[in-house]
Image: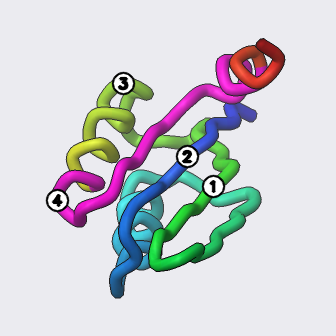
Amino acid sequence: MKKSIITVVGKDQVGIIAKVCTYLAENNINIQDISQTIVDGFFTMMMITDTNEATKSFSVLSDELEELGKSIGVQIKLQREEIFEKMQRI
């Protein structure tokens, strides 16, 4: 299984989760775990996903998620699990 971490951060608004999850479903990315919260009007979400069956390359997914984030006013980052883990150790 190829696990990836998706983070979403920005001002809370209607439809953030729906738009991100729709994109993931359309690209055959399975959500393994999800955590979200709203603090003082700011939305944060972290997802652990399985990208093993994804229909696009990792770099294309990353770019498209970043563009989706811009279009809805949030920042979306896609990272491979191993990179995320190494960054957290530093």
Q: Earlier in the sequence, mark 4 or mark 2?
A: 2
Q: CA distance from mark 4 to mark 2?
A: 17 Å
Q: Which mark, by number, is residue 8?
A: none
Circle 2 sits on which residue? 6
Circle 4 sits on which residue? 71
Q: Classify residue 2 by image quadrant.
A: top right
Residue count near mark 3 (Cα–Cα under 10 Å), binned few <14, some 14–19, many ≥20:
few
Looking at this rendering, what residue extends furthest in the front direction? 40
The amino acid sitting under disc 2 is Ile
Q: CA distance from mark 3 to mark 4?
A: 18 Å
Q: Are marks 1 and 2 in contact (CB under 8 Å)?
A: yes
The amino acid sitting under disc 4 is Ser
Q: Classify residue 36 by image quadrant.
A: bottom right
The quadrant the C terminus occupies is top right
Secondary structure under the numbered disc 3 in the rendered image:
helix
Circle 3 sits on which residue? 59
Residue 14: x percent and y percent? 35, 86
The amino acid sitting under disc 1 is Met
Looking at the picture, tell me which residue is in the foreground, 17 or 54.
17
Q: Earlier in the sequence, mark 1 or mark 3?
A: 1
Q: Are marks 2 and 3 in contact (CB under 8 Å)?
A: no
Q: Which residues are magenta?
A: 69-85
